[in-house]
Amino acid sequence: MLRVDFSGWGESAEALREKALRAEHPRSRERFMALYEISGGKSATQVGRETGRNPQTVMEWVHRYNQAGPETLVYQRSGGHPPLYL
């Protein structure tokens, strides 16, 4: 069973929800909310279906959080052309 491990990061499900609500980038909001939903009992398949993401991607977010903490879920632009709205 997929489980969000808060113990190493001093967080809770509610803290993930707050991070989702306060995150600047939509991708960060999506990732934190996905973990919040999983901590509430949903499966990666359910969350993937609801968000249009592959369940493997959702599981990867959980594993990244469990291994390296919440900062790994914050979206960081990785290159390419800058957005047109700058």
Image: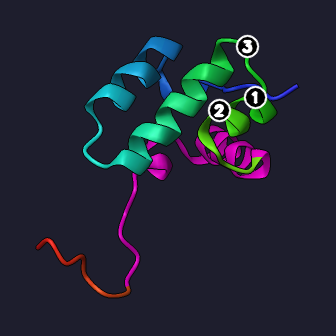
Q: Residue furthest bottom?
A: 81
| Amino acid of disc 3 | Gly
| Amino acid of disc 1 | Gln
Badge number at residue 73:
none
Q: Is residue 38 above or below residue 24?
A: above
Residue 30 shown left or right of residue 62 in the figure: left
Residue 9 shown left or right of residue 84 in the figure: right
Mark closest to the chain's N terminus, 2 or 3: 3
Look at the numbered disc 1 and give the secondary structure of its residue: helix
Question: Measured from the top left, where is residue 48 in percent x and y?
Answer: 70, 39
Q: In which quarter of the view is residue 65 placed?
A: top right
Question: Measured from the top left, where is residue 53 in percent x and y?
Answer: 66, 48
Residue 12 shown left or right of residue 3 in the figure: left
**Residue carrying label 1:** 46
Residue at 88 percent of width and 25 percent of height: 1
Q: In which quarter of the view is residue 18 placed?
A: top left
Can residue 69 be found in the magenta stretch? yes
Question: Measured from the top left, where is residue 85 in percent x and y?
Answer: 14, 71
Q: Which residues are magenta?
A: 55-79
Can residue 62 be found in the magenta stretch? yes
Q: Main secondary structure of the magenta part?
A: helix
| Amino acid of disc 2 | Glu
**Residue carrying label 3:** 41
Residue at 55 percent of width and 22 percent of height: 36
Looking at the image, how many numbered discs can be counted on the residues?
3
Q: CA distance from mark 1 to mark 3?
A: 10 Å
Question: Measured from the top left, where is residue 5 in percent x and y?
Answer: 66, 26
Mark closest to the chain's N terminus, 1 or 3: 3
**Residue carrying label 2:** 50
Look at the numbered disc 3 and give the secondary structure of its residue: loop
Look at the numbered disc 2 and give the secondary structure of its residue: helix
Could you classify mark 2 by the number of other residues whose Cα lies within 10 Å: few (under 14), some (14-19), or many (20 or more)?
few
